[in-house]
Image (spheres, grey):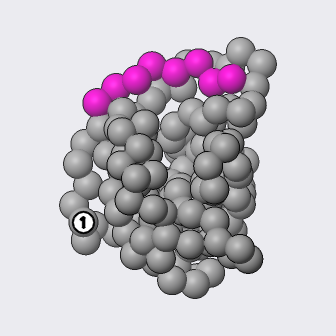
């Protein structure tokens, strides 16, 4: 399926992925889907992104606050995930064009500063960094 991958600090890019293992590889762990939009789409992210200290990525509407770590957006089929349609691919590329710096939260809404994103090399590996303090 063709999805839109959104990594912290980078412009969104299209990627072809198949199966659970590839989905988990993109997000760097167990997957969780959230549904903040009226359209038939899902944001698939790392279910432990926040507690594992993954970097803040982007804010999302609907009381979800924001997503920590890499996520992808896909379509929803009758029983499972599907390719993101071209019109929604264009919409979400534009919506997630800017990276965000998390300043805090106001209830469930993330308070962020939008900044320019860097282009991602298409063949560059997806990986997450743990930003915890080094052991002493």
Choose between 2 and 70: the one closer to the eye: 2
Query: Where residue 55 appears, x then y in whole percent?
Result: 53, 43
Query: Where residue 43 appears, x then y in whole percent?
Result: 61, 54
Q: In the image, which residues are magenta? A: 109-116
Q: Is residue 113 magenta?
A: yes
Q: State the residue lying farthest toward the right.
A: 107
Residue displayed at 46% across by 27% down:
101
Q: Which residue is mark 1?
A: 122
Choose between 61 and 54: the one closer to the eye: 61
Q: Is residue 13 left or right of residue 40?
A: left
Choose between 134 and 113: the one closer to the eye: 113
Query: Where residue 13 appears, x then y in whole percent?
Result: 33, 57
Q: Is residue 60 magenta?
A: no
- In the displayed structure, 126 sits above or below 25; it is above
Q: Is residue 69 visible?
A: yes
Residue displayed at 41% across by 44% down:
91
Give the dominant element type of the magenta stretch: helix, strand or loop: strand
Judged from the image, the secondary structure of the residue bearing numbered disc 1 is: loop
């Amino acid at each position: 399926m063709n999805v839109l991958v959104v990594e912290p600090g980078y412009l969104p890019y299209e990627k072809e992925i198949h199966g659970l293992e590839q989905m988990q590889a993109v997000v760097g762990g167990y997957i969780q889907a959230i549904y903040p939009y009226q359209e038939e789409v899902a944001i698939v992210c790392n279910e432990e992104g926040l507690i594992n200290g993954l970097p803040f990525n982007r804010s999302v509407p609907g009381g979800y606050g924001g997503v920590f770590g890499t996520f992808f957006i896909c379509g929803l089929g009758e029983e499972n995930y599907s390719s993101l349609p071209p019109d929604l691919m264009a919409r979400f590329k534009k919506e997630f064009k800017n990276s965000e710096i998390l300043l805090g939260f106001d209830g469930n809404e993330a308070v962020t500063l939008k900044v320019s994103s860097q282009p991602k090399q298409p063949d560059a590996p997806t990986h997450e960094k743990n930003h915890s303090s080094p052991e002493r």
